[in-house]
Image: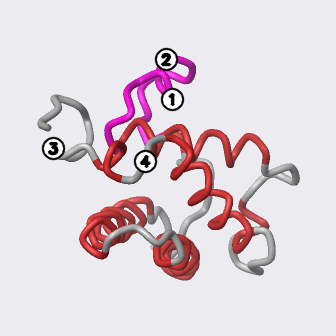
Amino acid sequence: MRLAVDGPNENLFLAVGGRPYFDRLVARFYEGVATDPVLRPLYPEDLTESVEHTAGFLAQFWGGGTTHYSDHRGHPRLRARHGHVPIGQEARDAWVRHMVAAVRESGVAEDLQARQIEYFEMAATHMINLG
């Protein structure tokens, strides 16, 4: 299936089972963030909205349609939305470590994991805004 969206051409959203996959993935990711000494200070005290926004963004990006995120929040503009957060190499690496662990624990096929990890590594590097 080919889609004309801002994400990848193949619909990973359908391949992994839809929104429930992204909700579980993001829940696992934020379990790591909650105790990470580098990342935790970068997030609000209550992670509820962060979890919801991240899961919605990823569901949309991977082919789930705009109802998961941009119908409510507008265009994702990932870097602009995070411009107020100081992100250096250490924070990027910690973020990737937790997200890769969450993907690896997902149980989806290796090729689907590889596609996600490649994106997360690229996107996290793009988010660095400190020298």
Name the residue tied to disc 4. Answer: 17
- Please name the amino acid that badge 4 sits on: Gly
Q: Disc 2 vs disc 1: Cβ atoms closer than 8 Å? A: yes
Cα distance in 3D space between marks 4 and 1: 15 Å
Cα distance in 3D space between marks 3 and 2: 21 Å
Q: Using residue 41 as the reference point, say whether residue 92 is left or right of it.
A: left
Q: Which secondary structure type mostly characterizes the magenta part of the structure?
A: helix
- Please name the amino acid that badge 3 sits on: Asn
Tell which of 94 and 48 is nearer to you. 48
Name the residue tied to disc 3. Answer: 9
Q: Disc 4 vs disc 2: Cβ atoms closer than 8 Å? A: no
- Please name the amino acid that badge 1 sits on: His
Query: Helix, strand or loop at disc 1?
Result: helix
**Quick check: is 40 in the magenta stretch?**
no
Q: Position of residue 50 (x, y in %)?
A: 69, 46
Q: Quadrant of the N terminus?
A: top left
Cα distance in 3D space between marks 4 and 3: 17 Å
- Mark 2 is surrounded, within 10 Å at the Cα level, by few (under 14), some (14 to 19) or many (20 or more) other residues, namely few
Name the residue tied to disc 1. Answer: 68
Image depth: mark 3 or mark 2 in front: 3
Q: Using residue 54 as the reference point, say whether residue 14 is left or right of it.
A: left
Cα distance in 3D space between marks 3 and 1: 18 Å
Q: Position of residue 41 (x, y in %)?
A: 78, 66
